[in-house]
Structure formats: C-alpha cells, structure tokens
Image (cartoon, helix red, strand yellow):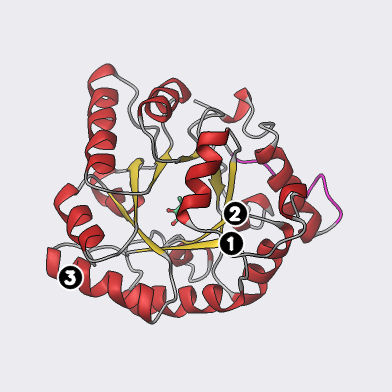
Amino acid sequence: MDKRYQKTTKPLTITDLQAMKQGGEKISCLTAYDASFSSLLDKVGIDLLLVGDSLGMVIQGQASTVPVTMTDMIYHSRCVARARRRAFVVADLPFMSYATLKMALQNAAALMQSGGAQMVKFEGAKPEIISALVAEGVPVCGHLGLLPQSINQLGGYRVQGKDSQAAQKIIEDAQKIEQAGASLLVLECVPSSLAQQICRQLSIPVIGIGAGADCDGQILVLYDILNIDSGRKPRFFKDFLAESGSIESAVQLYHSEVKEGLYPGPEHSY
Ligand code: KIV
C-alpha cells in the first residue's frame, strides 16, 4: 500500500480524490469486476475501482460493451463493493441505460442501492442528466474522448480530438460536464496535449486512459496490465506482470508507477 495510507483503511471519499488533485498526488485507478480482485487491489492501495462495462469484453467475451445490461452491472458492482475497504467505487451506466432522464435516475439509483457504487459514470456530454442526478445526491463521473458505447457509430477504437475542431468540442464538453456538477472526468484516447489543457482548466480530477502523463490520475483495464488478452494492444498498453513475479506485485508496480508519474511514459501517449 502507498506509504501515505499504510496506517489507515478509512474509506476514501470524493473529497479525498479532490484533495489529491489539489495536492498534486496522482490518483491510481483500475477496473475491477469481482470480490477477489477488489480485495487485492484495495489491499495494494489502488485509490479508485471502476466497475467498467468493459466487463462485457473481458468477462463475458462480447465484441463490445454494447450488450452489457443493468443486471450485469449491478451484479459485478455488488461483488466489488462488498470486498473493498478503502478504495472509492465507481460503476458504469451501460449502453442505453441513461437514454432518458427517468432511466438515468432509476438506473443510477439501482447501481448505488443494489450495486453499492459510490458514483456512476456515463459516456458523453449530457449536462441535463448530470445536474438531475447530482440534485438527487448521485455523484457523477463524466467520460469523454473515445466512447466505447458508440463503437458502432465510430467504426473503430481510434484516438479522438486530433484536429483542432474535434479538440475544441472535447474541451467545451468537459467544461459543460464540470459546470453541470460532475465530480470526476475520464478522458479516453486523446492527445496528451489536449488532456493537459483540460486538466489545467477543470477543478475536478481528470483520470486518463491513453491521455498522457498530465492527467490527475490514470486508469487501465485490470486484465490489460496482466496481459491476459493476446489481441492487438493500444499504444498505452503496458504489461506490468512481465516485470513482476506475481499478480499482486504487478498491481503494486502499476500503483507506484502511477503515483510516481512514471506511467504513462511518452511511448504510451498520443
Ligand atoms: O469500461 C471501462 O473499463 C472504462 C475504462 C476503460 C475507463 O470505461
């Protein structure tokens, strides 16, 4: 566990994550889908566990996150929430589960009440949905850049915000998300210069995946840091297990490299 937290397993709150941004401490995040990994990641000191809808691919063997249901998300969120002691738990609202305000409110309530999540994340800039959730006491994490739930519109997993018009749109969306009351923002697969600009402009913590070293924190899919999938690897991929003797050491290495600003390096960034 990170030295600063060795003596405490006090559950982290959104205020602690905010204080990390203000204090310049990087936030270490990983996806988790079950109780065993939740407990291991928590023990190592990972700050935030995301029950990502990436479970559709890495757990269920689906081709994308699109088939993931609320029933799946509640089940996995409950498994993760039950086993963690200190880490902050965020769960994804799956495809189409926040298509209307009413659906977003009902499904966010289910993720928190039945799934034990402390915050919900959803893709895209939907300020009216964010403000309605926040008004009801639901903490929200936005998600911009590459939006995997829109893969059938995008036609492929590509870096987003490369030209100035697309970059400007992401900057404006990030501002709208913060202004609507979100507490966190995930930025996926964007040039590091764009991510740096957004991190500086926003007061909420920005967590990057393929978004460069200047983000306030980093997140990766757990199974990717363990190199479980033999498929094509994105640029930000790093096999932490190859450099460690065990799964626990691989998670520890990831955690310390994020905290020390060693991961991601320029070779992992766009
Ligand atoms: O579902 C997921 O795992 C995610 C991360 C890639 C950020 O949204």
Q: Nearer the viewer, residue 216 or 219?
A: 216
Query: For the residue carrying disc 3, how many other residues have a C-alpha within 10 Å: few (<14), some (14-19), or many (20+)?
Result: some
Most prominent secondary structure in the magenta stretch? loop
What amino acid type should be assigned to the residue bearing mark 2?
Answer: Asp
Q: Rounded to the nearest whole Å, what is the CA distance between mark 3 and mark 1?
A: 27 Å
Which-is-in-front pick, marks 3 and 2? 2
Q: Position of residue 253 (x, y in %)?
A: 76, 46
Q: Which residue is mark 1?
A: 87
The residue that appears at 61% across and 76% down in the rendered structure is: 83
Q: Is residue 75 left or right of residue 38?
A: left
Dot placed on the residue nearer the N-terminal end, 1 or 2: 2
Per the rendered image, the range of residues in magenta is 237-245
Q: Which residue is mark 2?
A: 47
Q: Is residue 21 left or right of residue 150?
A: right
Q: Secondary structure at mark 2?
A: loop
Query: For the residue carrying disc 1, how many other residues have a C-alpha within 10 Å: few (<14), some (14-19), or many (20+)?
Result: many
Q: Which residue is mark 3?
A: 103
The residue that appears at 45% across and 60% down in the rendered structure is: 54
Q: Nearer the viewer, residue 39 or 87?
A: 87
Above or below, comparing residue 36 to residue 118 in the picture: below
Q: Position of residue 146 (x, y in %)?
A: 36, 41
Quarter of the figure with residue 25:
top right
Q: Pointers 1 and 2 in contact (CB under 8 A)?
A: yes
Q: Secondary structure at mark 1?
A: loop
Q: Rounded to the nearest whole Å, what is the CA distance between mark 1 and mark 2?
A: 5 Å
CB of residue at label 2: within 8 Å of ligand 1?
no
